[in-house]
Image (cartoon, helix red, strand yellow):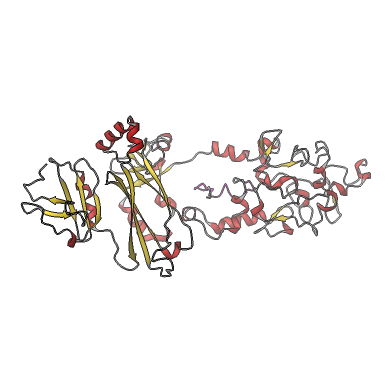
Amino acid sequence: MLDVRVGEDDFIVFADDIWDCSDGSDEEGIFIINKLSPHNEAIVNLNKLKRMCEKLYKNRPLSTFCDYRKEYPCLRNVTNLEEELWNFTLHKPCIPPSQLGDGIIQCYGARDEKNTIKRIDFSDMLGNAFLCEKSNKTIDYVRACTRIVSCPDFEDAHGCLMDSVPDSALTDSNLCGYDPFDVFCLNGECKRYVRCNYQFDCESGEDEYMCYSDGDTQELDAIDQFSYRRRREVDTKSTPRSLKISNIPSSLDSIIENENMAMKQTTDDKFVSQKSQNESFNKLQIAYNCNRGVTVHVLENNNLSCFCPPSYYGEHCEYYSDHLTIVTHINYTNSPYTNIDDDSVVLQVLALFLFDDQVIDHYNFRVRPVDEINTYIKHKFFLLYSRSEKSLNHRRKRYFNRTDIINNQPYSVRFEIYTLTVGQNNSVPLVFKYHTLCREKLIHTGVKCFRDDDYLCICEEDYYRAECFGYDGSLDRCNYCLSGGYCVRGDVTNHVDFKCLCPRCHHVKS
């Protein structure tokens, strides 16, 4: 996922030649992205981002030998450094982005693994330093090619093109090549005092290879262990940030604006700055108000409220919900959908979480068999344990009864699958609006029932949820209820499995 900062400097974490991901995908992988996720698309202009990356990566050392959109330029990790390192006929100085940060050294000096290799001498990531392969010693780029610090066998010198320096230049200050910052370009021409001056003096920029990137120019006076990604750390800690929270409900003006602007709506229209809208809330209060939930600004009472995830509850999402995690897959073997090619068929899966055959929670999702028949797809969701007083008391007693825990399991999960057809009215029946009525305590022991043409719901005393199931009116015609009570059958094969829905002024005899 792309990590972006919204504001005047939208792309400050991109196109700066500093890898924030271990594989450099936040920099080197931008060109292979064809479409952003909806989350990132709302705040990132992909075309603008690619133009910024093109400007930066089209002009870096050795990039003339590579396709900057598909390849990362670097000298290859070869065996014979003197003969093969700069021989681009044998070894093209380019690798695909997929080989970056994969734990295998492909580039000379481990340039491709700078975020994955740990420096033994500094206990930090390699960063902008050269790894001596045989000794595991590291040389900071700012000190490389200075002829002062080097690998034990001088393997780092080959990357500085020192093989081209004549012996006479090493002792004669009048000759090009005497100064460590002199460079013999690949075409044989010698340039004086050009190494690491942040401009290409050689045709392919080889004079800037094994130098600091533009992203670290501010830290040239520090050794690499402190400079690599140092600017990112300092910037993250010191840059003031305005917290943005949603208004609930949205103002009327905002609703009208959303309808009129439609696709032109920007993120700043949807979110309201905490500073401009509510000076009374300090940043820490907002940041930590909802634990792992989402903080919203309630316009009606000018307070902060929390949208909690399923695994937490409470005014500030401070309590952990006991829940059951379900990971399931639909096996279509021996089903009518084994050879299906009709994409209009959709299955609605209903998962019921039961306690002593009473529904305490449920979850439903839809699948299209034609999409899953040859693809193994898992569905993950949570089912919450009831927090009713009756349930909590039962769990307290059960906690101290080890035998009951081992031998008795009152909880179960039941799956029901219904076939839906695209284009038809498959909306959930209005019976579910009756759930709020089931929260009312009953004065006497009995049941309440609500039904429509397709579903029937029953709730009992001390239960705060209704148990709903498919309803066929032809199956509930029984005559076991007195005083005109309505007879509801359970198991149609068991004549004593029924419940009576009593008329007004009557109740079930205990």
Count of numbered tags: 0
The image position of residue 399, as x and y in percent, is 33, 32
From the viewer's side, name the closer residue of 11 and 85.
85
Q: Residue at x 36, y 61 (%)?
A: 347
Q: Is residue 133 above or below residue 347?
A: above
302 sits to left or right of 115: left
Camera sees residue 471: yes
What's drawn in magenta, residue-wise?
4-18
The image position of residue 483, as x and y in percent, is 5, 52
67 sits to left or right of 418: right
Q: Quadrant of the C terminus?
A: top left
The image position of residue 428, as x and y in percent, is 28, 58
Residue 7 is inside the magenta segment? yes
Camera sees residue 295: no
Residue at the farthest bottom position: 342
The image position of residue 507, as x and y in percent, is 9, 45
Question: Predominant secondary structure in magenta?
Answer: loop
55 sits to left or right of 242: right
Residue 144 is inside the magenta segment? no
Residue at the farthest top position: 400
Q: Residue at x 21, y 61 (%)?
A: 472
From the viewer's side, name the closer residue of 399 and 80.
399
Q: Is residue 84 above or below residue 301?
A: below
Q: Residue at x 43, y 62 (%)?
A: 333
